[in-house]
Image: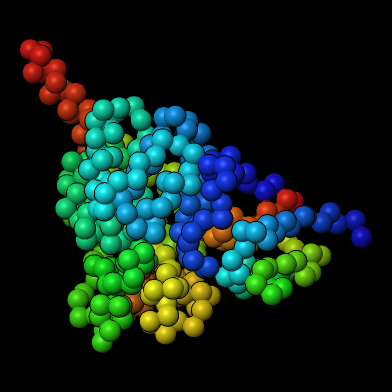
Amino acid sequence: MDKKLPTIEIIEKYCKGCHICVEFCPTKVLEMQGFVASVKNLEACIKCMQCELRCPDFAIKVTA
Amino acid sequence: MAFDYEKYIRPGKLPHIWCPGCGHGIIMKGLIRAIDSLGLEKNNTAIVSGIGCASRLPGYLDFCTLHTAHGRAAAFATGVKMAKPEMNVIVVGGDGDGTAIGGNHFIHACRRNIDMTYIIMNNNIYGMTGGQFSPCTPTGAKASTTPYGNPDPAFDVAKLAIGAGATFVARGTAYHATQIDKLIAEAVQHKGFSVVEILDDCPTTYGRRNKFKSVIEMMNRLKDIAVPVKAAEKMTPEQLQGKILTGVLYKEEKPEYTTEYAKVIERAKGGK
């Protein structure tokens, strides 16, 4: 597979577990692991950056 | 490429104090992106606030910032702009701070048309002080001081600003994150008093009392009630029932206050 995957960095110290990124990801890349978000399915990421834009806690960084 | 927000945030200030799911963080990011897109200098930009959850925002930002008395942000900001007319002045605050306690300052800043941007984060409640109802709490909604439902009709902040004389009025929501920075950037560029109302969610003091099961439900409400101005032109009044218009709602050019005041100074010195 030659598709270049983005990197999704989740800063666990900042994440407050509000679920916004998990619910509004159009391709369901993220999931909750306990109280913090984590990456479940990176291959599905379409780099729309909605998780980064909507994260109120500055906890997600998507590098495409 | 991930946006480098930390460039504009004071070191060691994150994580912020806002509750999980509070939209203030989303709006702060929008403000940072807007400032970045305009290339405003840190030393030439003043961010002023009053008291409240939303008014904690300037504390995180690495600009010239002022955290002032409750509701008095517009008054302090007017002082900054009069002393340094070349400075970009941005006021941030909540609905209680801006339209109740600071309502008088707000309408008179609108009337003067002084060149600054007022961002009102409207979460329909006084969050920090314990969930008292504000002038933006919808009729029938519950707050700690209206446990049987709020009998008062709510302010339409945009109409209030237009009526009071603001020359640029826009509205966005915390859900529509990509629109926030564009609205703020356009407002900052406008010469005159510009108001950007951003509808927000307060899951802790408003959501819990008003039967919102989660942050997601509150965000979906924002998504459902928002109608862009252009789309609304093709809709009937019945379809627009319960909806709120978003986008740039009003724009006009009028003489700006600091420019007019400079002319007064010239006249007082004996010029024409």
Query: Residue at 17% of width from left, 28% of height from top?
Result: B261
Q: Which image quadrant is residue A11 in?
A: bottom right
Q: Is residue B15 above or below residue B90?
A: below
| Residue B11 x/y as whole percent | 57, 42
Total number of numbered discs in the rendering? 0
Quadrant of the rendering where the N terminus of chain A is positioned: bottom right
As drawn, the residue found furthest toward the right would be A1
**Can the viewer see residue A28?**
no
Q: Is residue B160 above or below residue B124?
A: above
As drawn, the residue found furthest toward the top would be B270
| Residue B2 x/y as whole percent | 67, 48
| Residue B116 x/y as whole percent | 31, 40
Residue A10 in the figure: left or right of residue A19: right
Residue B46 in the figure: left or right of residue A47: left
**Can the viewer see residue B238?**
yes
Query: Residue at 38% of width from left, 37% of height from top?
Result: B46
Out of B153 and B209, give the one closest to the viewer.
B209
Tell me how the rendering is colored: rainbow
Query: Residue at 44% of width from left, 29% of height from top?
Result: B43
| Residue A2 x/y as whole percent | 90, 56
Query: Residue at 32% of width from left, 66% of height from top?
Result: B129
